[in-house]
Image (spheres, helix red, strand yellow):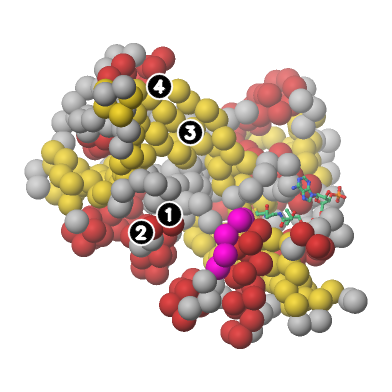
Amino acid sequence: MAIDIRSITDNEIAAFRQVISRAFGGDAKDDEESLQRFRDQVDLDRTYSAFEGDEVVGTAATFSFDMSLPGGAMTALGGLTMVAVVPTHRRRGLLNRLVAAHFADCKARGELVAGLWASESSIYGRYGYGDACPVFQVSYDSSKVGVPAGPDETRIVGKEDAEDAMKAIYSQVLTSRPGQLARSDVWWEYRHLRDPEEWRNGGTERRYVVAYRDGEPVGYTTYRQKSKWDEGMPGGSVTVGEVIGLDSDARLSLWSLVSSVDLFPKVEAWGVPIDWEFPNQVANPRAIKRITGDGQYIRVLDVPAALTARGYQATDSLVVGVEDSHGLTGGTFRIDASPEGVEVTTSSDDPDVTLGVATLSRLYLGAPGAWAMAQAGLIHGHEGAVQRFGRLLLSEPAPWCPEVY
Ligand SMILES: CC(C)(COP(=O)(O)OP(=O)(O)OC[C@H]1O[C@@H](n2cnc3c(N)ncnc32)[C@H](O)[C@@H]1OP(=O)(O)O)[C@@H](O)C(=O)NCCC(=O)NCCS
């Protein structure tokens, strides 16, 4: 039977949710509250579902985000989410069709970039997505690290008191790094304040910590505890959520608090920026284990407009050739950039560097790694040109997306 791709209607939400949930090993509830949460978060016009007759056999949707760019501007981002194909219909090209529908939708809305979080890093490079916001997964035994006390006062507060401080602080740091997403009130409630049992993974309720300076909130974090005893000795763990501070003093104060909870010496955090300053602040940085993982992926959909939208910390002029096998964007462009501004023009000159759109997308938000990508054959050009290109796109601070979607 033919398979059509179309958006879903309200009475198809339950079937759509069931396919996603099962793909990730769950069983979605069909109660009215769960369906309403879906309606509140998902624009049905931005769903793409594969139907065989009346049956949902594949799902995808796009969130409409605003994302920070190097230099502090914001841009609309089409965030791909809820991607699943039922096991009986896998490897017949349905994902290709769902992603094509998502790209067509993003292009029609004028979004210059698309984003996603990948379940497996092997899937999305073929569509031009690149890992643009790498993160550290962190774990340490706080008794071995030598964490100094932070200068700010920290308090464990209730959810209601935390909410205002979290929203105010997050909005102040939103453009301080590329890759961060603006959050609506609905997003805050469903993604950061709601705390259902099934999200706890055997841990406690979410604890909220706010850092104060002169009585004013300057940072926040959240954590859960998991109790454990090793032959009579305390071995509990603290799993830390996002640590957001207006400056490094605020962040140190929060890391210091989560590193000093009696009976809970093990600290774990997932999704820490790769230029995390904390190891530079402790006595024994080697005791902090850091594993690099892929974070938010980016797909540039309009090369000249996307390169014009972001800022640059270096000054240079380079001709760059970008190949896009999907035919959505690409071409040869001269980038004349400096901290004062940028001009991107179509060029007929020989490119200084050439690369595929997935590699450009990896570097677009300012992540390091151009030299290694060139060594691996992903960027072509003389070594000097590759180094200049890498420096031109680089952002400090590094891109980071504390938002999994
Ligand atoms: C990932 C998933 C959506 C793929 O759907 P699918 O319809 O089988 O994919 P397609 O048939 O369109 O495959 C398109 C291409 O991707 C490749 N591909 C698909 N899944 C892959 C995977 N898990 N790893 C590597 N490559 C994969 C296919 O081999 C094919 O490659 P080709 O074009 O070179 O032949 C499906 O396996 C699934 O639902 N997985 C569980 C949920 C999940 O991981 N979702 C992604 C959330 S980010």
Q: Is residue 261 visible?
A: yes
Left or right, 134 with respect to 372, comes to: left
Question: Could you give the CA–CA distance between mark 4 and mark 2, rounded to whole angstroms?
Answer: 28 Å
What is the residue that sits farthest to the right in this orientation? 1
Q: Quadrant of residue 130?
A: top right
Between circles 2 and 3, the one closer to the viewer is: 2
**Mark 2 vs mark 3: which is more N-terminal?**
3
- Which is in the foreground here, disc 4 or disc 1? 1
Q: Which mark is residue 199?
A: 1
Q: Secondary structure at mark 1?
A: helix
Q: Closer to the N terminus: mark 4 or mark 1?
A: 1
In this picture, which residue range is highlighted in magenta? 24-28
Residue 153 drawn above or below residue 158: above
Looking at the image, residue 313 sits to the left or right of residue 235; the answer is right
- Which residue appears farthest toward the front when viewing the image? 231
Q: Report x, y in % for residue 270.
A: 45, 38
Helix, strand, or loop for circle 2? loop
Is 98 on the left-hand or right-hand side of 166?
A: right
Q: Where is 225 relative to 329, above or below?
A: above
The disc label shown at residue 137, or none:
3
Residue pictured at 81% horizontal, 76% vertical: 52
Residue 180, image x and y in percent?
46, 50
113 to the left or right of 276: right
Is 141 a magenta residue? no
Q: CA distance from mark 1 to mark 2?
A: 7 Å
Residue type (three-letter) at the residue carrying disc 3? Gln
Instruction: Give the spatial CA distance, label 3 vs label 4.
Output: 10 Å
Residue at the disc numbered 2: 195
The local crowd at label 1, few if under 14, some if 14 to 19, many if 20 or more residues have their Cα within 10 Å, is few
